[in-house]
Amino acid sequence: MTTSVNLTRRSDNGRINSSPVSRSAAIVRFPEGCPQSIRIPVEDPDNDFVRCRYSTNSESNFNNDSFPYGVLDEVNN
C-alpha cells in the first residue's frame, strides 16, 4: 500500500486540509428484492464540496460490478 500526503497550508484559511467525515453506520442492511436508497451524510471541516465516486480497481479489493444493481446518484447531491 502507498499513500501521498500534502501537508502544505491552504491559501484560503492558512491551515492544512482536513478530510471529510461521515457519521453513517458502518454496516447497512436492506431486505432482499426491495428497492431501497441510502443517503450518506458527510461533512467537511473546511467546508469543501464533497462528492462520492466509485473506487478504481487499484483502490479496492472489489470489482465495480460486484454490486450490479447499485446506482450512484451524482446529480442530486
Image (cartoon, rainbow, N blue to C red):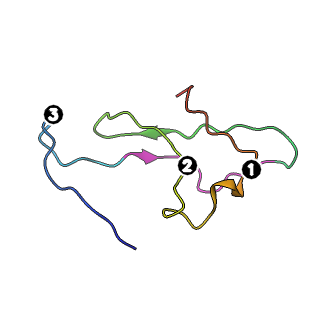
Residue 1 on image: x %, y %: 40, 74
Residue lying furthest right: 33
Q: Which residue is mark 1?
A: 68
Q: Which residue is mark 2?
A: 54
Q: Residues within 10 Å of mark 3 (few under 14, many from 20)?
A: few
Q: Residues within 10 Å of mark 1 (few under 14, many from 20)?
A: few
Magenta extent: 20-30
Of the pair 5 and 28, the residue shown nearer to us: 5
N-term-proximal mark, 2 vs 1: 2
Q: CA distance from mark 3 to mark 1?
A: 41 Å
Q: CA distance from mark 2 to mark 1?
A: 12 Å
* Residue 25 part of the magenta segment: yes
Kindly check if marks 2 and 1 are in contact, taking CB atoms under 8 A apart as contact.
Answer: no
Q: Which residue is mark 3?
A: 12
* Vertical arrangement, residue 38 with respect to residue 16, above or below: above
The majority secondary structure of the magenta stretch comes to loop
Q: Which one is in front in this view, the residue at disc 3 or the one at disc 1?
A: 1
Give the residue type that dot 3 points to: Asp
Q: What residue is drawn where x is 28% and y is 38%? A: 46
Q: CA distance from mark 2 to mark 3?
A: 29 Å
Q: What residue is drawn where x is 18% and y is 49%? A: 16
Q: What residue is drawn where x is 15% and y is 36%? A: 13
Residue 64 on image: x %, y %: 63, 55
